């Protein structure tokens, strides 16, 4: 497990590097799936940029998903459950731990990074927020972010948001690499921590390109047929696999 934790710490510090503008102070959180099926997620209040192995909590994903299925569960229920975890481990899980469980268990990810990149958040706080998920602007955006990122309008973080994303994933055509949360931030779902970084960086680039296109007079996106072709090309499948293991 130490190797997995080391990789999670490295991912967290990279995403939390202030020079990258992805997360500051206590913003953002990360998680990884362990070989035993459990998960590790950042503790509440810990800084990504200064993360150490002590800033993470090991949890059972099925217990978190059970909270989502419990119609009587509310924010107070979650607070009690997380306080119990804190009493056992000394750290309280991030409020987004349930959403990380959704991404790891239902979204097909092995590692997850949640950040608030400035260019992405700028678009997510605009009338063009949904375009980040629906407008494919250039080939590498399709290769790295996939054909159909998921956009979810603003929902209160925590239990309600985790339930909403769970329901959206069940109706989505295929597991997305990127989940855009309106007025909130980005969830990058990767097969590896390295892929989480690539997805995050490409989402930032896509947001910058979208903002530039809007400033230049309007968006001229790839046609759906062109985006489908890029997504299905054998050479792009090979490149996507190579990038994911880089």
Image: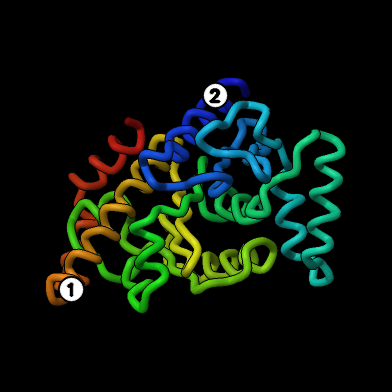
In the image, is residue 150 above or below residue 202? below
Asked which quadrant contains residue 93, the reply is: top right
In the image, is residue 98 above or below residue 151? above
Residue found 32% across the figure and 53% down from its top: 204
* Residue that label 1 marks: 219
Crowding near the residue tagged with mark 1, few <14, some 14–19, many ≥20 C-alpha atoms within 10 Å: some
* Residue that label 2 marks: 6
**Could you say whether the residue bearing mark 1 is in a helix, strand or loop?**
loop
In the image, is residue 100 above or below residue 168? above
Residue found 62% across the figure and 24% down from its top: 1
| 134 to the left or right of 64 | left
**Could you say whether the residue bearing mark 2 is in a helix, strand or loop?**
helix
Alpha carbon distance from label 2 to label 1: 41 Å
Asked which quadrant contains residue 57, the reply is: top right
The C terminus sits in image quarter? top left
Crowding near the residue tagged with mark 2, few <14, some 14–19, many ≥20 C-alpha atoms within 10 Å: few
| 128 to the left or right of 173 | left
């Amino acid at each position: 497990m130490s190797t997995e934790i080391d990789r999670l710490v490295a991912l967290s510090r990279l995403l939390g590097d202030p020079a990258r503008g992805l997360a500051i102070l206590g913003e953002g959180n990360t998680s990884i799936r362990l070989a035993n099926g459990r998960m590790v997620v950042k503790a509440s209040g810990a800084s990504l940029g200064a993360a150490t192995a002590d800033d993470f909590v090991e949890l059972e994903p099925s217990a978190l998903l059970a909270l989502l299925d419990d119609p009587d569960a509310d924010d107070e229920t979650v607070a009690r459950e997380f306080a119990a975890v804190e009493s056992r481990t000394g750290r309280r899980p991030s409020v987004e731990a349930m959403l990380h469980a959704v991404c790891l268990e239902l979204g097909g990810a092995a590692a997850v990074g949640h950040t608030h990149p400035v260019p992405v958040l700028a678009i997510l706080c605009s009338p063009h927020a949904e375009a980040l998920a629906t407008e494919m602007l250039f080939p590498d955006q399709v290769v790295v972010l996939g054909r159909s990122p998921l956009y979810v309008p603003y929902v209160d973080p925590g239990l309600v948001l985790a339930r909403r994303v769970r329901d959206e994933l069940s109706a989505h055509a295929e597991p997305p690499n990127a989940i855009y949360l309106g007025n909130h931030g980005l969830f990058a779902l990767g097969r590896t921590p390295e892929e989480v970084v690539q997805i995050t960086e490409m989402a930032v680039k896509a947001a910058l390109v979208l903002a530039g296109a809007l400033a230049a007079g309007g968006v001229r996106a790839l046609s759906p047929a062109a985006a489908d072709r890029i997504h299905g090309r054998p050479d792009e499948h090979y490149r996507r696999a190579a990038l994911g293991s880089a």
